[in-house]
Amino acid sequence: MNTEGGRESESGAAAVLPAAFMRGFTLIELLVVLVIIGILVSFATLAVGNDRDGLVQEEARRLAALIELGGEEATLQGRELGLQFTRSGYRFMFLEPQEDGPALWLALERDSLLRAREFHPEITPQLELEGLPQSLPTEPPEQGAPQLFLFSSGERTPFLLRLAADDGRIVHEIEAGPLGPIQRR
């Protein structure tokens, strides 16, 4: 059995390594690895926080675009639309004239863009109409008018909608007057 320099012998048997090669990790090597792991964990934590901000921002962007689209649809179709909010989501509605009574607000169910949507569970909405805070129901009522009106004349109910992450640190606002563009902050 040849064990020159700690190599395997020609017969294939493992050679005995000298004592200099049989050592563990030093304390400094372990500490360096722990510091690297700590840095990676902190980056991962920051990335999760940014995802929450991106989530709220994306929802605000989508909702502002849908409200703009709803206003344009109301004008082009010559009918009144509305938006009904709950704590967990929103749905677009239209005013349906009735032959035997007053017109009814009905949910838009066959529109692929202006369909009912749920907020992400980590998002909490807060709605103000004409400067007054609104209490949002848990579930949409069976019958009733929407909170936000999109009129066929191009006007709409002035509103401020805050979308906040559950921890309250990340807030995006959507605001609009009776006419003009919708602002996002």
Image (cartoon, grey):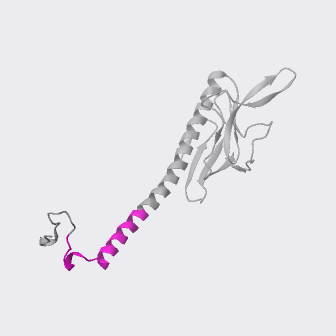
| Residue 137 in the image: above or below residue 20 | above
Rendered image quadrant of residue 1: bottom left
Q: Note whether residue 157 is visible.
A: no
Residue 18 counted in the magenta span: yes
With respect to residue 48, does 84 lie above or below? above
Answer above or below: position of 103 versus 180.
above
What is the magenta range? 15-42
Q: Is residue 20 depicted above or below 136 in this figure?
A: below
Judging depth in this view, the residue of 39 and 177 nearest the camera is 39
Asked whether, in this view, residue 102 is left or right of residue 9, the answer is right
* Tally of numbered tags: 0
**Is 56 or 68 nearer to us in this picture?**
56
Outermost right residue: 100
Q: Is residue 163 magenta?
A: no
Q: Nearer the viewer, residue 71 or 144?
A: 144
Q: Nearer the viewer, residue 56 or 155?
A: 56
Q: Position of residue 152 (x, y in %)?
A: 67, 27
Q: Position of residue 20 (x, y in %)?
A: 20, 78
User: Which residue is found at the position 69% from the left and 24% from the top?
Assistant: 79
Q: Quadrant of residue 7?
A: bottom left
- Quarter of the view holding residue 154: top right
Residue 163 can be seen in this image: yes
Rendered location of residue 163, percent (x, y):
60, 50
Percent coordinates x, y for residue 16 in the rendering: 21, 74
In the image, 97: left or right of 45? right
Query: Measuring 44% from the left and 59% from the top, which residue is drawn there?
Result: 44
What predominant SS class does the magenta segment belong to?
helix
